[in-house]
Image (tube, rainbow, N blue to C red):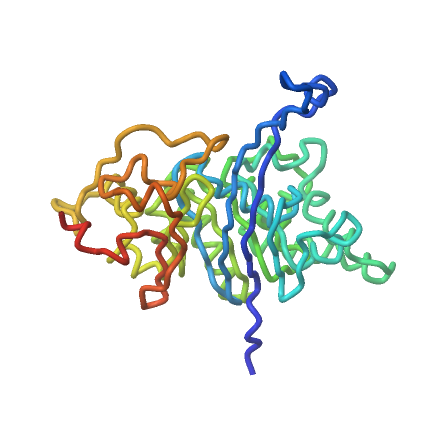
Amino acid sequence: MTDPTPMLEVRDLEMHFPIGGGVLDRLKLDSKGLRIDRPVVHAVNGVSFRINRGQIMALVGESGCGKSTVAKTIARIYQPTAGEIRIEGEDIASYGFADMLPVRSKMQMIFQDPYASLNPRQRVRDIVAEPLLQQMKTAADRKEVPARTQALLAKVGLNAEHAGRYPHQFSGGQRQRIGIARALSVMPGLIIADEPVSALDVSIQAQILNLMMDLRDEFGLSYLFISHDLSVVHHIADTVGVMYLGFMVETAPRDTLFARPRHPYTRALLSAAPSIKARRDTEEITLMGEVPSALSLPSGCCFRTRCPFAWDRCAQERPVLKDVGDNQSVACHLIDEPERDRS
């Protein structure tokens, strides 16, 4: 019987970054002698989603929307401000360093820059073996590390002679294969991939994406895939979450989202994406103005300052994700009053 517990469930996740924090900042007082609160960057604001076993979920949005911060917070590179992060039902949001050690065997990360994420002083075999050695407790287990390392390198398309080389001796695509082998070494259930192909040539991107999908099928992996490239997302994702200014504004199965986007921001993203088609299937929406500052969020809907359909309610009330059918959820007041979308 299949375990119904999702591989990852995120509930009301928040990640805020106070600015400053030095001695002088703590001593700042207003005219009445009261301490002045430090400004806060609201990077992630109440994000919720779930990833089932064997599923690939992509987070998309403009640069600065908070998608990479979500990934790093789930990986516990950051300590979340609030919310729950459940790995196979276990809430790790408040875990310390020691508590996270056994969890690392369930969750690994692939980083955007394959060169910066590899230790230039280590040989490839040591880079891939290091997570294994951290998890293995007995001498008998450690004897298996060299053979498992070679098997992992072969699994990602590298051969035995690559094991003794250093990262600078490889191309970008090969470095990312090393990063994938390292992430795969402890056989995690969840891999967080933070724009893993954005620094690669298009032809190499396809190879890495196909490799990741083959590994998903072989090992039953789940992925949280971060990207701003909609063509990449369409190729790899099962479900898609769209973020804007730290908020989740729409979630849907991939085919549903690309065929019937409901949120104005999602529609704007799709209409702005390059296409070789003579005509588009979706109405073009051109966004005006700039993304507001995460230091001072707009009242009501986070997108209202750029939305062509905004009205009074959008400034007064913040929309929440609502199920609109077909596993699609949208945070937009147009769902309640669709006639405004046609005006």
Q: Residue at x 26, y 47 (%)?
A: 267
Residue at position x 57%, y 28% in the image: 39
Furthest-front residue in this view: 32
Which residue in the rendered view is the most extreme toward the right? 139
Q: Nearer the viewer, residue 298 or 78?
A: 298
Query: Is residue 290 shown left or right of residue 176?
Result: left
Which quarter of the image is occupied by the N terminus?
bottom right
The reply, left or right, for residue 3 in relation to residue 255 is: right
Quarter where residue 135 is shown: bottom right
Task: State the image coordinates of residue 328 (x, y, percent, origin top left).
Answer: 35, 62
* Residue 20: x %, y % from top left: 64, 24
Query: Relative to residue 267, is residue 169 drawn left or right?
Result: right
Q: Nearer the viewer, residue 50 or 342?
A: 342
Q: x, y (%) of residue 273?
A: 27, 41
What is the number of callouts on the image?
A: 0
- Residue 209 as seen in the image, left or right of residue 140: left
Instruction: Give the percent coordinates (x, y) of residue 47.
Output: 50, 51
Which residue occupies 38% across, 47% down? 317
